[in-house]
Structures are given as C-alpha cells and as structure tokens.
Amino acid sequence: MSIVHSDGLGQFQQDNATPHTSRVATKWLQEHSSDFRHFHWPPKSPGINIIEDIWDAMLHAVEKRSPPPRTPMDLLPVLQDSWCEFPPGYLQTLVESMPRRFATLLRARGGPTRY
C-alpha cells in the first residue's frame, strides 16, 4: 500500500469472502490497520465489485486464445495483451455503473444482489 499510495490516501478493499475473513487475514488487517484505511464492504456482495467484471472479461479473453496458454509464463503476455485490448472506455463504464450497483444493494437491504 505504501508503494502504490505513498500519499497515505489509499484504501484497502476486500469483499468479505470466506478466505478474506479467515483468522490469518483478519489478524493481518488488525496488525496493519494503521498503515491504510480499510474500506468496509458489504459481506459477499460481488455484484458491486467491478473487479469481478474485469476478471470475467479477462477470463473470456484468455479462453478465446488459440493455442491456450499452458504455463504461467505463457499466461502473462496473454493477460497483458488482453488488458490492452479492452475497448476504450470499458473501465470508465464500470466505474460509472457504481451508483446503480449501490442502489441495487440498498434495495436488497445489504443482501445478495444479481447486478
């Protein structure tokens, strides 16, 4: 966090998935809580996390490759190329969808969403 946000304004976000709330992860967050702000996320609400959309798009891009990557070393350039091939404005569209995503979450009263 100190490398990416040397200004101290970074926020750590995690989606409260079961692995992220393990004793080890929880202890680490507590021990490092003075190093960054922790953005509290509604439990298990992937519908409002735009990274899920990005991971899905990357997965589809990788699956379309022929031949498919066979090793981690093969995968890295495929991921880099796929990232660069996102249409202009794709990430901005995801960011702009956040108000709708939060409205959906509020309507669901913090419960699961199908955004």
Image (cartoon, rainbow, N blue to C red):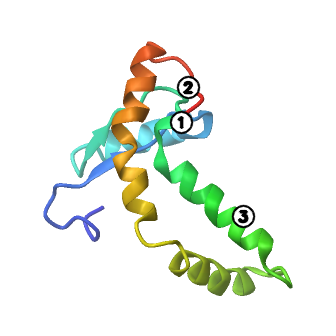
Residue 12 position in % (x across, y down):
34, 48
Q: Is residue 46 left or right of residue 34?
A: right
Vertical relation: 49 (above or below) 112: below
Q: Is residue 23 visible?
A: no
Residue 113 - label: 2
Q: CA distance from mark 1 to mark 3?
A: 18 Å
| Residue that mark 3 sits on | 60
Mark 3 residue type: His
Q: Are marks 1 and 3 in contact (CB under 8 Å)?
A: no
Element carrying mark 3 = helix
Element carrying mark 2 = loop
Q: CA distance from mark 1 to mark 2?
A: 6 Å
Residue 38 position in % (x across, y down):
30, 41
Q: Quadrant of the N terminus?
A: bottom left
Between discs 1 and 2, the one toward the N terminus:
1
Residue 96 position in % (x across, y down):
34, 48
Vertical relation: 24 (above or below) 92: above
Between discs 1 and 3, the one toward the N terminus:
1
Residue 10 position in % (x across, y down):
24, 55
Callout 2 crowding tier (Cα within 10 Å): few <14, some 14–19, many ≥20: some
Callout 1 crowding tier (Cα within 10 Å): few <14, some 14–19, many ≥20: some
Residue at 16% over, 58% down: 8
Residue at 35% over, 32% down: 40
| Residue that mark 1 sits on | 47
Mark 1 residue type: Gly
Element carrying mark 1 = helix
Residue at 45% over, 36% down: 26
Residue 115 - label: none
Q: Are marks 1 and 2 in contact (CB under 8 Å)?
A: yes
Between discs 3 and 2, the one toward the N terminus:
3
